[in-house]
Amino acid sequence: MLHRNVGRADRAVRLAIGIVGLPVGLFLLHGLAGAIPGLILAAVGFVGLASGASGFCLLYVPLGFSTARQRQSALSR
C-alpha cells in the first residue's frame, strides 16, 4: 500500500508547479504540436500535479525520504 510521503509545503509547491507547468508546456511552448521543450515541461507539470494531489512521490521510496509528518501510534505513547 502506498503511504503519504509528501508533506504539506512540498505538496503545495508540487501543485503550483503542475498548475503552471502543464498548460505553459502544452500551449505556450507548443507541446500539443509536438515541440520537445513543451512536452518536457508538460510532463514535469503532470508529475507535479499527480504527486501533489496524491501526496505520494515514487522517487522518495528508494531514497528512503519523506517530507510528511509521521503519525504516532497510540501504542507508542
Image: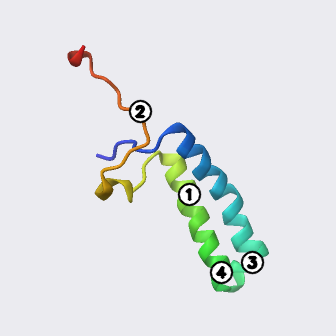
Q: Residue at x 42, y 53 (%)?
A: 57
**Mark 1 lies on residue:** 48
Element assignment for label 4: helix
**Amino acid marked by disc 4:** Pro
Q: Which is nearer the N-term, disc 4 or disc 1?
A: 4
Q: Position of residue 27 (x, y in %)?
A: 76, 73
Q: CA distance from mark 1 to mark 2?
A: 20 Å
Q: CA distance from mark 2 to mark 4?
A: 35 Å
Mark in front: 1 vs 2: 2
Q: Which mark is residue 34?
A: none
**Whether label 1 touches label 3, CB < 8 Å:** no
- Up-down: is 48 above or below 44? above
Q: CA distance from mark 4 to mark 1?
A: 17 Å
Q: Residue at x 63, y 70 (%)?
A: 42
Element assignment for label 1: helix
**Mark 4 lies on residue:** 37
Q: Position of residue 5 (x, y in %)?
A: 40, 44
**Whether label 1 touches label 2, CB < 8 Å:** no
Q: Position of residue 16 (x, y in %)?
A: 66, 51
Q: Residue at x 20, y 17 (%)?
A: 75
Element assignment for label 2: loop
**Mark 2 lies on residue:** 69
Foreground pick, 6 / 65: 65
Q: Give the position of the C terminus as an image quadrant.
A: top left
Q: Residues within 10 Å of mark 1 (few under 14, many from 20)?
A: many
Q: Position of residue 48 (x, y in %)?
A: 56, 57
Q: Residues within 10 Å of mark 2 (few under 14, many from 20)?
A: few
Mark in front: 2 vs 3: 2
**Amino acid marked by disc 3:** Leu
Q: Which is nearer the N-term, disc 2 or disc 4?
A: 4
Toward which corner of the image does residue 60 lie, by quadrant? bottom left
**Amino acid marked by disc 1:** Gly
